Amino acid sequence: MGMTMTQKIIAAHAGEKSVRAGQLVEAKLDIVMGNDITTAVALKEFKKTGAKSVFDKDKVVIVLDHFTPNKDIKAAEQCKACRTFAHSMDVKNFFDVGEMGIEHALLPEKGIVSPGQAIIGADSHTCTYGALGAFSTGVGSTDMAIGMATGQAWFKVPSAIKFVLTGKPAPWVSGKDIILHIIGKIGVDGALYKSMEFVGDGIDYLSMDERFTMANMAIEAGAKNGIFPADEKAISYAKEHGAKEPVIYKADDDAEYDDVITIDLSKLRPTVSFPHLPENTKTIDEAEKEKVYVDQSVIGSCTNGRLSDMKIAADILRGKKVNKNVRTIVIPATQQVYLDCIRLGYAEDIVKAGAVFSTPTCGPCLGGYMGILASGEKCVSTTNRNFVGRMGAKDSEVYLASPAVAAASALKGYICSPEMIGGNE
Amino acid sequence: MNTEGKVFKYGDNVDTDVIIPARYLNVSNGDELAKYCMIDIDADFASNVQKGDIIVAGKNFGCGSSREHAPLAIKCAGVGCIIAPSFARIFYRNAVNIGMPIMECPEAAKEINAGDRVAVDFSTGVITNKTSKKTYKAEPFPEFMQKIIAQGGLVKYVSKKINGEV
């Protein structure tokens, strides 16, 4: 019986000729990653293992991105502990304020991740790197600690759902809309324990940024990982960013899938997830009818903080003013994206429109800081979760959308399509 | 190994943000986190829960973030076991790794009510509802998982194993 892309990568890292779904294997890891919240726990567990050094100074990555620049004294203490640990272990890929960006935008940009690798990260959105054709999955701090000590992790080999994407998306339909549509279709546990493999001629129309957005949100359907084939676009992205030589794994023709779901991208509309689950999706046309007036619009995060997301925001906001009732917060995901936004004039467009333009941070996405919601407030956001209390007060509300919808809604005052503000893609 | 206590019952898709909101993640101490456990769906949980009590919930328990703080907060609050039809995969893995017993049992999760007195035997997988006098059979933990839980988590288990103590 054939193997899926994910199964092939796992087999290669476990030293096995072939693996089947459900099998338990121990696999070698190419990258072990953590952030300021999860590393703070992992370093305590790491010490308990008795290990004196990390398995490979080049393969451990620590990014201080969630509550940085430090939001309060306790967060500062956590970062200090992570910093001390990283320095004492001589971790080469340690990113502190000034160099850091949101981890899942930063690692591909720095060429740290490459097609064919096996990666764990103590952050649920580690599945992002599947856009490059890597097997990449989120774990907790204990797994990170054991991974740092041994360079290995155990996995239950996942089964998979194949998503065959066909056709060309209409204007204003982005990778974010596609993944929200998919989550709406299969539910927040629709891919529980499984791989989501994205294939089909439709992926040719998706930029790398859009693929990162889609793989990023595989976890919101409960998946172990999301993965795209490493095509020419992915390989040239990896090469341009100085990543290691790609290793290409293709699914076998006779690979077994639990389900095959075909989606005609040309039929999709911009999509919004209503509170309080990512699966509560509506098309923008349905959403507009409800006239959801928002208090805040957030454009950023590991899901949508890349340069193409900033460009869309700037293009829509340029020469206009945001609605006076909508606090608009734009957060480029990395220092490079930040710099590019300055160089290309996007930062000026955004600030002149009356939005704030922040340094990179996860900040408001998880209700950390930089845009916390008060009781009863509503926010349209390009982030990835809209759970109860996610961005602030427990009776505040988050509506997940694309950067185009979030920017258009910031101008109009309620959740609307970019078509409403006369935007042309 | 087993546990017995009163049941706290919740619905489907209990996420890690309501188990322990990120505004409390600027510390990693389990006892400190336990004070805010479940605060956004059950503000009285932390003050009412007693050692050995049991959480019974709907499908996909623990969905969302990879924060190990979530099972840690529940464990340090004193909860003896979580019973649900299914668990989100990172939560499942984290729970085992930190020694927080969890059981997948759709029938028990459906029928057990809030406030019931329930006993769980981890080695046989038998769940006994002492209030309704009904028993359920979940898949028992394999031996290695029982050992991890008995030692209080994967790291302690591995270090004891290295020293030949387990």
Image: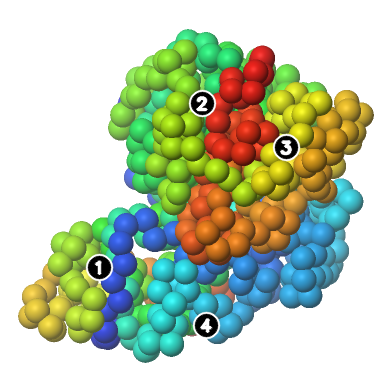
As shown in the figure, which amino acid type bears the numbered disc 1? Pro
Contact (Cβ within 8 Å) of mark 4 with mark 3: no
Residue located beneath label 2 in the image:
A270
Spatial CA distance of label 2 from label 3 is 21 Å
Contact (Cβ within 8 Å) of mark 3 with mark 1: no
Residue A38 position by quadrant: bottom right
Spatial CA distance of label 3 from label 1 is 57 Å
Nearer to us of marks 4 and 3 is 3
Image mark 4: chain = B
Spatial CA distance of label 4 from label 3 is 40 Å
Which mark is first along the chain, 3 or 2?
2
Spatial CA distance of label 2 from label 4 is 41 Å
* Circles 2 and 4 on the same subunit: no
Residue located beneath label 3 in the image:
A322
Residue A290 position by quadrant: top left
Residue located beneath label 1 in the image:
B140
